[in-house]
Image (tube, rainbow, N blue to C red):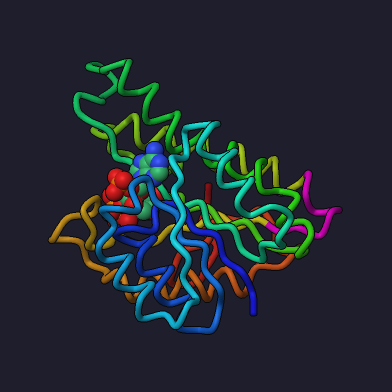
Amino acid sequence: MPTYLITGANRGIGLELARQAAARGARVIATCRDPGHAMELQKAASASDGKIEICQLEVTSDESIAALKTRIGTQPIDVLINNAGIMGKDPQTPVNMDFAELEHVLSVNSIAPLRVTLAFLANVEAAKGKIAVLSSIMGTFGYNDGSKLAYCVSKTALNGIFRHLARELKSRGVSVVLLHPGWVRTDMGGAAATVSPEDSARGLLGEIDACTVEKTGRLMSFQRGEMAW
Ligand SMILES: NC(=O)c1ccc[n+]([C@@H]2O[C@H](COP(=O)([O-])OP(=O)(O)OC[C@H]3O[C@@H](n4cnc5c(N)ncnc54)[C@H](OP(=O)(O)O)[C@@H]3O)[C@@H](O)[C@H]2O)c1
């Protein structure tokens, strides 16, 4: 039974990834900031026949990461999914930027995934496992709308960090995939979004399945297909 560790698993895409991974027979360490209030995740865990274990994790906190590391110990992790992310508050345009918020968005979306990944790298290496990262088409250089600039550049930085990490980890048998989930109907994506969390998560899990060391370090759409940076 493979083990998945997922960040931000209490709602949105992360919750659906946890549900579907467990339904496929995986053991899921489903992390969230506030397990006591993660009602949907608690329901999913109750229905999972013990496959979903809920753990606390605030991805920007070294203390929180260390506590989870202590709890998990040396257990191998087959798939680490860095899903947690935020859009950030406005204003965040090239000519009107809230700099405190820009730093916050970079801290959650770009730096925390590396922080979490390095904390659990030995566990992923032990499984010769995979690291998946929720990126976005909004982080690509071809995306020409600057109205959510903090979010866009946080995903561009994320791509850069994990492309370099992928090269480093190839010889260690660990693969890395960056994922665009589509425009998904979650709190972040909004009600008008075109993709259901179910369809997105199904595509993302398929894309993670297909990732190998030979194909490491690519940006992939949930609908399969490599995307340009
Ligand atoms: N929805 C889309 O259309 C779309 C498109 C492209 C990429 N993405 C990416 O996909 C990922 C998931 O998005 P989503 O739509 O599911 O978003 P969402 O519904 O807003 O959920 C975000 C999740 O991230 C968690 N989170 C935020 N900050 C955190 C922190 N500091 N520590 C731990 N957890 C934290 C949230 O936990 P709390 O409940 O505690 O806040 C929540 O579980 C994100 O990385 C996002 O950028 C989404």
Question: At 23% from the left edge and 33% from the top edge, which residue is drawn?
Answer: 147
- Looking at the rendering, the stretch of residues picked out in magenta corresponds to 168-175
User: In the figure, 144 relative to 186: above or below?
Assistant: above
Whole-percent x, y for residue 158 in the image? 52, 39
Residue 173 is covered by the magenta coloring? yes
Q: Nearer the viewer, residue 180 or 107?
A: 107
Quadrant of res 194: bottom left
Whether residue 170 is visible here, answered yes or no, is yes
Q: Residue furthest right?
A: 171
Whole-percent x, y for residue 94 in the image? 29, 21
Quadrant of res 47: bottom left
Whether residue 138 is visible here, answered yes or no, is no
Q: Nearer the viewer, residue 81 or 44?
A: 44
Q: Residue furthest left?
A: 191
Q: Nearer the viewer, residue 61 or 84?
A: 61
Question: At 13% from the left edge and 61% from the top edge, which residue is drawn?
Answer: 192
Residue 121 is covered by the magenta coloring? no
User: In the figure, 80 relative to 206: above or below?
Assistant: above
Question: At 60% from the left edge and 51% from the top edge, which residue is drawn?
Answer: 71
Whole-percent x, y for residue 82 in the image? 51, 51
| Labels in figure, total | 0
Whole-percent x, y for residue 198 in the image? 32, 75
Question: At 32% from the left edge and 30% from the top edge, which residue is drawn?
Answer: 149
Q: Dividing the image into 4 quarters, which one contains the N terminus?
A: bottom right
Q: Please give left or right for residue 26 compared with residue 77 in the image.
A: left
User: In the figure, 114 relative to 39: above or below?
Assistant: above
Q: Please give left or right for residue 143 compared with residue 61 in the image.
A: left
User: In the figure, 167 relative to 97: above or below?
Assistant: below
